[in-house]
Amino acid sequence: MLWKNTADRFGHVSVLIHWLVALTVYGMFALGLWMVTLGYYDVWYHQAPEIHKSIGTLLFIVMVVRVVWRFISPPPKPLASYSRLTHISAVLAHIALYTVLFAILISGYLISTADGQAISVFGWFDVPASVTGLPQQADTAGTIHLYLAWAVVVLSVLHALAALKHHFIDGDVTLKRMLGRSTD
């Protein structure tokens, strides 16, 4: 099994983290959209936000691990067939995805802790409320959270379309590398 990245493909840890984050982000997006439609007397009115907060906190931890892993196991080198524009676009897209994801997670934290209450992560541990009492903290962070959630969905769709373009139009091995497959 190939755990670490090589010069020409991603290892299993990077692939696992990539798809875990992708599926979690889309699941959280769907959960968030559903949560805001719930009425006060709905059974899930209080449970869904607690699940959302818990998963968001765990996602933050996974994202930190992901960033650390990029230093431990750097991603494969760009393909020689990539133009300078393609390489720069890919780097900027990844930076944008990471930045938006962390900003979503931080804004979620600010929403959740605005009242001074810690976040209980499935009852396993608590994340203390260290930033509270900012003017309209929950409302401002909530608006930012919503727009960033849509932004990460749009960015991730563009990311997926770029991978498909590389595979089906350019005929290169970008998608195979992203899936951890051999490029030979």
Image (cartoon, helix red, strand yellow):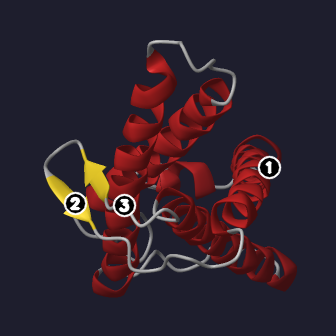
Q: Could you say where residue 7 lies in the image, as x and y percent from the top left?
A: 41, 77
- Residue flagged by tag 3: what amino acid is it? Gln
Identify the residue under disc 1.
154
> SS class of the residue under badge 3?
loop
> SS class of the residue under badge 1?
helix
> Is 179 displayed left or right of 5 in the figure?
right
The mark closer to the camera, 3 or 1, is: 3
Q: Are marks 3 and 1 in contact (CB under 8 Å)?
A: no
Between 48 and 157, the residue placed more toward the observer is 48
Q: Could you say where residue 24 lies in the image, as x and y percent from the top left?
A: 46, 42
User: Residue drawn at (28%, 59%), measured in percent from left and top?
Assistant: 13
Asked if 27 appears above or below 112 in the picture, the reply is: above
Which tag, 3 or 1, sits closer to the chain's start? 3
Identify the residue under disc 3.
117
Q: Could you say where residue 86 lies in the image, as x and y percent from the top left?
A: 80, 74
Asked if 59 appears above or below 31 in the picture, the reply is: below
Identify the residue under disc 2.
126
Q: Could you say where residue 32 lies in the image, as x and y percent from the top left?
A: 61, 36
- Write down the quadrant of residue 68 in the picture: bottom left
Between 151 and 180, the residue placed more toward the observer is 151
User: Residue drawn at (69%, 56%), measured in percent from left and top?
Assistant: 142
> SS class of the residue under badge 2?
strand
Asked if 47 appears above or below 142 in the picture, the reply is: above
User: Residue drawn at (34%, 47%), measured in percent from left and top?
Assistant: 54
Which tag, 2 or 3, sits closer to the chain's start? 3
- Residue flagged by tag 2: what amino acid is it? Asp
